[in-house]
Amino acid sequence: MSILYALDLAGTLVFAISGILTAIDKKFDLVGTAVIGFVTAVGGGTLRDLLLGQTPVGWMNDLTYLGLVGIALPLCYVGRGYISKLRRGMFIFDTVGIGLFTIMGLEKTLNLGLSPVIAIMMGIVSAVFGGVTRDVLCAEVPLIFRKEIYATACLLGGLVFLAVNMISPLRDLNIGISIAVVILIRYLAVRYHWHISVKPLT
Amino acid sequence: MSILYALDLAGTLVFAISGILTAIDKKFDLVGTAVIGFVTAVGGGTLRDLLLGQTPVGWMNDLTYLGLVGIALPLCYVGRGYISKLRRGMFIFDTVGIGLFTIMGLEKTLNLGLSPVIAIMMGIVSAVFGGVTRDVLCAEVPLIFRKEIYATACLLGGLVFLAVNMISPLRDLNIGISIAVVILIRYLAVRYHWHISVKPLT
Amino acid sequence: MSILYALDLAGTLVFAISGILTAIDKKFDLVGTAVIGFVTAVGGGTLRDLLLGQTPVGWMNDLTYLGLVGIALPLCYVGRGYISKLRRGMFIFDTVGIGLFTIMGLEKTLNLGLSPVIAIMMGIVSAVFGGVTRDVLCAEVPLIFRKEIYATACLLGGLVFLAVNMISPLRDLNIGISIAVVILIRYLAVRYHWHISVKPLT
């Protein structure tokens, strides 16, 4: 199992946990909670694959993703209090997850011969759309529209990946650097309360 | 016309009626009501086909489905009071509908060479996603997340279908047995107020 | 650059502006505002392409559409007050936009060999679904369900297009006539407060 695949699974698991905890907080029942967990975990990659015409979508051919949601579900019901204490660890895996999802979506799009601009868009879609679907299904305005540094970190990570790819052929290293950029930006943003505020004129 | 096709149309009609009645209750206008009726009727199969890459989606090549919504619309405006008294009949057709949609989605997925686990998922998606879309378009938390026996009945009906298919080659009979299971579970759930309650620890 | 392409871009720009102004009114941040603008502008054509299986979807192969959102964004932040005074001009471009999107969606569907009924549906989807997605992402009941003349104008414009195509081979003229019908209906509807009211019998 490659390191990238392992990180992908770790990111998926953390996304599933975040979706499941949200649903439990909202007092959804078991089925609703499972659906929200699954959608949060794979929704981004699913929309990307639909837009790119890559069907059947990825998780249909690798049951591991579905299995991770099956693992996360009892974990969250039993260990909710304990998981809440792991917020720092969750934050790291979540950030690694969005960094990785961004790069993987970006690469998949480039490999189809589409433009780097579209590739970065598809990278961001892969990273954030799971959370957007979770919020729409919960009848809430998507969080991403109020915590924009999330998408911005993906954008910058994607740009860095395109840049280092031009000067270095070491794909794994380039991915590592790009994910490190995403983590750094999110860490600094949380640490120093960064916020991109653009006020319209009157 | 085969029995299965007739049941499929009956299920579609009942789904359309349930969507239209919901929209009328919410005082949507004519266009909104027609859209909600159509989406409730075909939304589940549409998402299934999109995820499986089976496009153009099914109802584009058989106008009967669209026609059923066209029939249901005036029926509901004229006979809303009368239809409300048919709740028992509606319940039966609705349950036959979700049972049948589950099995048809399941079979279609298996025929594409995908795993039985994914096939059951796609069966459930076919059966419940029309109602989910209806609720999202009405800016409500999907009902399915609060009435989980609905999806659970589809799940068990799908498992029974896979099981009887292993021991019997009589497809129509197997479908009948599986739909009967879905009906029985929903009937018992309503009759005895079944509810799957899983409380998280603290 | 053909006239049709120019009108398509003009319609896209106006749709993007309407989405962006909505998002600013709702105090979304920069990223959320950009997403709403883009989705409002291309959401209709995207759903149409997904349902028809025409992927990668259109805007992936022509970055002009994305660029228009990039132009509209600063325009709206800087000139919001000024744009509000242009409501009459916006109304015209918006109506030309939905007329054109209807005809283009209709033609694309016919060219795939699907029925005229489905073609008109896909035309309406192209014209209105961007606005529906905007409203769903804002956690509101889609406006289209309360201002039905919008979809009805597209429907009639589509029917007129099919009719004149039968008697005249002049495609550009036929498109012009059909768009004129859409504009006329919307103008009359706004001017004389038309409203299709269908009350259910008790």
Image (cartoon, coloured by chain):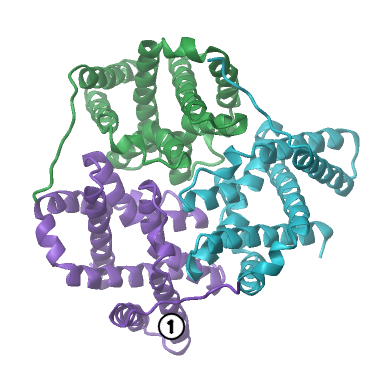
Chain colours: A purple, B green, C cyan
Please say if A179 is above or below B81: below
Q: Chain of mark 1?
A: A
- Answer few, some or many: residues within 10 Å of disc 1's Cα (few below 14, many 20 plus, some between 14 and 19): some
Q: How many numbered circles does the render carry?
A: 1
Please say if B185 is above or below A85: above
Q: Position of residue C79 (x, y in %)?
A: 67, 72
Amino acid tagged 1 = Val
Quick check: can you spot residue B29?
A: yes
Q: In this image, C102 relative to A107: left or right? A: right
Q: Quadrant of residue A89?
A: bottom left
Residue annotated with mark 1: A160
Under circle 1, the secondary element is helix
Residue at 41% across / 58% down in the picture?
Answer: A129
Residue at 62% across / 43% down in the picture?
Answer: C125
Q: Quadrant of residue C4?
A: bottom right
Q: In this image, C83 relative to C136: left or right? A: right
